[in-house]
Image: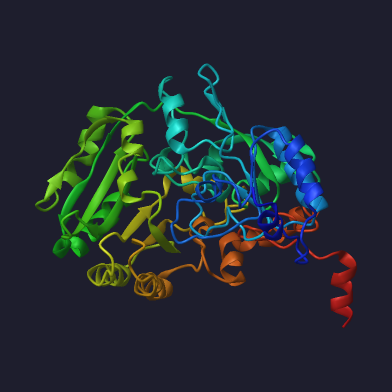
Amino acid sequence: MNNTASVRSLVNAKGTTVREDAITVFQETFSGPVVRPADAAYDETRQVWNGTVDKRPGLIARCTGTAGVIAAVHFARENDLLTAIRGGGHNVGGRSLCDGGIVIDLSLMKAVFVDPAARTVRAQPGVTLGVLDRETHVHGLAVPVGVVTGTGIAGLTLGGGVGWLVRKYGLTIDNLLSCEVVTAGGEVLTANAEVNADLFWALRGGGGNFGVVTSFEYRAHPVHTVLAGMIVHPIAKAKELIRFFRGFMAAAPEELTAYAALFRLPDGTPAAAVIPCYCGGLDEGARVIRPLREFGNPMMDSVGPMPFPALQSMLDASYPNGRHNYWKSAMSPEFPDDAIEAVVESANKITSPLSTIVLEYYGGAYSRVGPTETAYAHRGDQWNTGIYAQWTGDSEAEPHIAWARGLAAALEPFSSRAKIISFIGDEDETAIHAAFGANYGRLADIKKKYDPTNFFRVNQNIAPAPQEGRKAARVMR
C-alpha cells in the first residue's frame, strides 16, 4: 500500500490531512473492511449506479452492523470529515459518495427478517428491492417499494418511495413502522409513532438528514401474483393514448397502479406504452384492465399474470449499472392537454435512444395521507412526470442534460413546483426547499435537535434551524 498517497486523500473539512496513526487505529478496531485509495478494491468499491458520478473519497468504511456505523460516525466527527452515507448507491445525484472525506458504506448490511404472522419485515439498509421482494414473496407478501430491483431500500424509503402498489397501499413511508437510527453523536435511537415520534415523522420523507438508519421495519401486504405487463403503441398515437390513460385512471380502482411511458424500442423505434399492475383478484383485474388493452391497435401487449417480483424486475434492463443518468421531475395536481403536448413534443426530440419519460398517476391510498402527517408534503399532486435522460459514456452529456432541462422547463407552467427528492441532482437550494414544501420549517427544527452541527450534509440538505438568539438578532437589525 502506498500510505503517502492514501493519507493525502483523506482530509478534514479545513483541508488538513488526517494523521496516519489515527487512521491506523480506526482500521485496526473497525469491524468491517476499510478501503483506501491505494487499495486494489478502491475503484470497484467507489462505483455507484450512475456512471456520471466519479467521486474519490479518502476512506470507505464498509459497515457490517450497527456497531461499525457508530465507530465510523465517531471517527468522522472526531476528525471533522466530510461524511457521505451509502446504502444501495442508487442516488442519481451521487450523494452517496464524497470527495476527500469518508463514506460510511452500508451495502454489506443485507439481512431481512420476515414475520409472516404479523405481516411485518425488518431489513438492514444495504438491502435492495430485489432482495426484499425475494424474501417477502416466499410468504405471499410484498412491501410497497420502487420499480427497479437494484435500488437500495434506504434512500428510496427516506425520500418517500413510489412503486407498483402506491395506489392500493401508499408510499413506502406509509408502510414504515419503526427505524433504528445512529445519530450524529453516535447514539442509537428507536424512532416510531411512540418513541422519538418527531424523528420518525422526519425520516418519512426528509431524506438522510437526521442520522444513519441501520434497520427499517415495514408493514407487508398479501400480494403474490399480479396482472401486469406492457401495452405498446406507435408514438403517433401517444397524445391520444395519454388522454385516454388520464381519464381511465381517474376512475380506476385502487388495486390498479399504471404508468404511461414514452421511449425507444430496442431497434430505435419511438413508442408510447401503458404499464399496468393490478394487485387484486385476477379475474376482476382482467375486467378492469380490458379497456386499456382494447384501446387502439397496440404494437405489443404482454399483460398477463406474473409473480410480483417478476414485475419488479421488468424494467431492470432499462436502468443498468454504469450508464450515465440525469433526472428531472415535474409534479402537478392535474395533467392538462397542453402538458401532454409538451411531453410528446419532447419525446419526438429525444437526444438518446436510452432516455425515457414516465407519467405517474397516484391518487388512492397515496392521497389519503395528509401533507403534514409525514415529512413528504406533496399529497395534493396526483401526477409526476419523471424525465430520465440516459446515455453511455462515449456520448457527450450536454445535449441529453439540455433535453431533460428543456422538458422540465416546458412543464413548469403546469406544475406545482414541488420536487421529489430522489430526482434532485445539480439543483440549487431553492429546489431542495421545494422538495420539502411547507414541511421545511418543521424539518429544520428537528434537524437542529438531532444534528445541530449539520454533520449529515452530503444529501438533499436541510440546514438546522438557527438558534433563537440568532433569530432575535436578525429581527432587531
Identify the residue at the far bottom of this view: 477
Do we see residue 435 in this rendering?
yes
- Splitting the image into 4 quarters, where does residue 80 fall? bottom right
Q: Nearer the viewer, residue 243 or 80?
A: 80
- Left-right relation of 166 to 155: left
Q: Position of residue 55 (x, y in %)?
A: 56, 59
Q: Please, is residue 120 above or below residue 450 in the view?
A: above
Q: Position of residue 128 (x, y in %)?
A: 48, 38
Q: Nearer the viewer, residue 249 or 93?
A: 93
Q: Nearer the viewer, residue 45 or 329?
A: 45
Identify the residue at the far top of this view: 117
- Left-right relation of 372 to 470: left
Residue depicted at x 25% and y 62%: 353
Q: Nearer the viewer, residue 351 or 11?
A: 11
Q: Position of residue 295 (x, y in %)?
A: 14, 50
Residue depicted at x 22% and y 53%: 273
Q: Position of residue 207 (x, y in %)?
A: 61, 52
Do we see residue 450 in this rendering?
no
Q: Please, is residue 306 above or below residue 38 in the view?
A: above
Q: Quadrant of the C terminus?
A: bottom right
* Number of marks in picture: 0
Q: Please, is residue 277 above or below residue 325 in the view?
A: above
Residue depicted at x 79% and y 45%: 74
Identify the residue at the far left of this view: 297
- Splitting the image into 4 quarters, where does residue 8 fall? bottom right
- Splitting the image into 4 quarters, where does residue 466 fall? bottom right
